[in-house]
Amino acid sequence: MSFHLDQITYEDSIKIGSDHAPLKIVEYISLRCPDSKNYEENVAPFLNEYIKKGKVQRILKHFDKAKYPLEVGNVLNQYLDYSTPVETFRLIKKLFEEQNTWGSNRLSQIPHIAKDYGLTLQTKNREQAQRVAKEINTINVENVPTVFVGEVAFVETINLDEFKETVESYF
């Protein structure tokens, strides 16, 4: 698959780590995607030491993929407060942990679930999701998660050993 990496922006995202980090890892995820959950729980923790040392910055972007059952994640994304990245990232981790509970609900239930998490609808998120969708189309991203480590793309099920090797090749 060919990607247009020059079209990736760092906008409309949650950034974890220093803006001055030499390696930017751009992650297109879906809150409802089991592979995105697996990536967050089993692969991404490897990055924590690099983030603490200022070597890596994670740039998370929600991909509002129009596919059942991912739509419930798209609706929940409308409630995330991107202006508080640290708190929102903690919440994203919790949402992944509890994905099997909230993720099986109907779309109409998601606003109530968001309220249970203490969230309110963020009016700017719809426009943000549209900008991310345009970026995704331009880059040629089709699946979640799609994670770019420099010019290397990892798509869907991500092998931890290959991911580690790629990240470590930058240092």
Image (cartoon, helix red, strand yellow):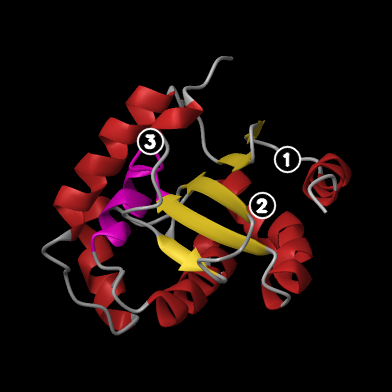
Density class for disc 1 (Cα within 10 Å; few <14, some 14-19, many ≥20) is: some
In front here: 33 or 143? 143
Q: Which element is circle 3 on?
A: loop
Q: Amino acid at mark 3?
A: Tyr
Q: Amino acid at mark 2?
A: Tyr
Density class for disc 3 (Cα within 10 Å; few <14, some 14-19, many ≥20) is: few
The residue under the point 64% across, 57% down is 22
The residue under the point 31% across, 50% down is 74
Residue at mark 1 to residue at mark 2: CA–CA distance? 7 Å
User: Given contact means CB atoms under 8 Å apart, are the residues at marks 1 and 2 in contact?
Assistant: yes
Can residue 26 be seen? yes
- List x then y, in percent, for residue 95: 48, 68
Task: Write down the residue under mark 1.
Answer: 158
Task: Write down the residue under mark 2.
Answer: 39
The residue segment tinted magenta is 62-78
Q: Left or right? Give the position of 97 relative to 125.
A: right
Task: Write down the residue under mark 3.
Answer: 68
- List x then y, in percent, for residue 91: 46, 76
- List x then y, in percent, for residue 41: 69, 62
Q: Is residue 15 magenta?
A: no
Foreground mark, 3 or 2, reads: 2
Q: Which element is circle 2 on?
A: helix
